[in-house]
Image (cartoon, rainbow, N blue to C red):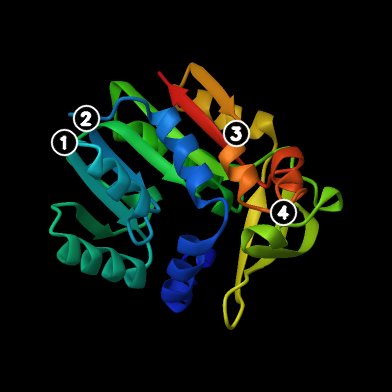
Amino acid sequence: MEEQADYDTIGEHYEKFSNTVAQRQSELRDILNMVGDIQGKSVLDLACGYGYYGRELHRREASKVVGIDISEKMIELAKAKSSLYGDDIEFHVQDVCAMELDERFDIVMAAFLFHYAQSTNELEAMFQAAADHLKPSGKLIAYMASPDYQLKNGNCDNYGFKILSEEPWKNGVRYQAEFLTTPPSPFTFYRWSREDYENAAKKVGFHHISWEKPTVLESDLARYPQGFWDIYLQNCVHTGLVCQF
């Protein structure tokens, strides 16, 4: 998965980007709502990056958090933050599709993972990896490229990155984009259809699937100029997904 490996190069730029974008708190709020009560529950954080979401769940009294990422640089940053904060989160450099852990978790997080799948076969492999490490009563929480996004209906400049191109790719869509860091940090991601996502989930045993649109509160609206959130609400590039057995 070459696009994720690029985070070895852009790791520190990505951290600065993600900590300053306007939608950060909105995304966190939506993910926490999808997770629900986390107290006393175990979490596997896939494509964990520098550990932001797993650390937020740890702060809310998750019993255990394990982070997996293919990028050595990201895991290095994640471990440094754990040392700084004194937490006991575990981090491992592994390819999600090849990982083998000797336990199952109450929550498997896949924030910004599935849109790096370059084929529906790879997408299914990602879902399979999540399912293999989830307890029967657990939940998969995903946040990824929305099946409904259309570049012609608005770009993402307000939200910290810009899409440079949109082109057909197999039976989906491929995007070339860049984080608006200094200098800009390029990345590639993929959009699959709602049916593709749901078929992949069902193939690996998920029977309960729900889509969760991003939300913005009145307090979010008040902090930015009128119209700032329009594209985020009407043509958001990301969406949430909850899967259960």
Q: Residue furthest right?
A: 152
Q: Which residue is mark 3?
A: 197
Question: Do the CB atoms of the residues marked 2 and 1 lie less than 8 Å apart?
Answer: yes
| Alpha carbon distance from label 1 to label 4 | 40 Å
Q: What residue sits 46% from the left and 22% below the top? A: 206
- Amino acid of disc 1: Ser
**Mark 1 or mark 3, earlier in chain:** 1
The residue nearer to you, when weighing 79 against 129, is 79
Horizontal and vertical percent position of residue 145: 62, 46
Please say if 158 is above or below 26.
Answer: below
Local crowd at mark 3 within 10 Å, few (<14), some, or many (≥20)? Answer: some
Residue 225 badge: 4
Q: CA gap, disc 2 to disc 3?
A: 26 Å
Is residue 184 toward the left or the right of residue 33 in the image? right
The amino acid pointed to by label 2 is Lys
Task: Using a 10 Å C-alpha cutoff, classify the residue at mark 4 as few (fewer than 14 neighbours), some (14 to 19) or many (20 or more).
Answer: few
- On the image, the x and y values in percent for residue 29 come to 46, 38
Judge depth for marks 4 and 2 and give the one in front: 4
Residue named by callout 2: 41
Q: Nearer the viewer, mark 4 or mark 3?
A: 4
Front: mark 2 or 3: 2
Q: Quadrant of residue 94?
A: bottom left
